[in-house]
Amino acid sequence: MRFFVKFIVAILLCLYLFILSQQILFKFLPLHVIVNHFRLNFEGEVFWGSHNFIPFKTIFYYLFSVTDMSFGVRVANLAGNVIGFMPFGFLVSILSRSFLNLKIITLATFCLSLVFELTQLIFRFGSFDVDDLILNTLGGALGYFVISLIFNYVYRKRI
């Protein structure tokens, strides 16, 4: 039974990572553009132009900007990054006991998010934003807390 559960969780994790990759890297690009885009391209516009390397700059912008940006856009950009990575902390914790540790889940989530952000930076599939790293890592940690609360509840019920 335990093997079957882990097998299902592994499949769910793969499916989740596929969907997450599509949503982060390829959400605005048709397939033919994606295929032609996989090359390092540093000519033309300034490479660092549309990226954010200043921590909390984007977060503060969405929280405190006085522009006519809708509340929905603000929530989607902030909560979307957090919620989008919660399943990673949840699923990886179920898949392996070695990931039943907040520090390890936080580091693993940070590394996954960094891969996505660097891919966006290098291949120009979006823009690098250090605040996405912060929010995504928070999401993975929250996913870990959810599963740890469930594990603790189930463990107490068994006693």
Image (spheres, rainbow, N blue to C red):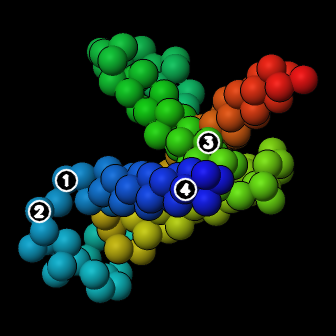
- Picture disc at residue 115: none
Residue with the mark numbered 3: 90
Say whether disc 3 or disc 4 marks the residue closer to the N-terminus: 4
- Picture disc at residue 30: 2
Mark 2 or 3: in front is 3
What amino acid is found at the position of numbered circle 4 in the picture? Answer: Phe
What amino acid is found at the position of numbered circle 3 in the picture? Answer: Phe
What residue do we see at 56% from left, 27% from top? 60
In the figure, residue 155 lies in which quadrant?
top right
Q: Distance between the Cα atoms at labels 4 and 2?
A: 36 Å
- 108 sits left or right of 124 in the view: right
- In the rendering, at what x and y percent does residue 125 appear? 31, 64
Residue with the mark numbered 4: 4
Relative to the observer, which residue lies in front, 44 or 95?
A: 95
The crowding category of the residue bearing disc 4, from other C-alpha atoms within 10 Å (few below 14, some 14 to 19, many at least 20), is: few
Residue with the mark numbered 1: 28
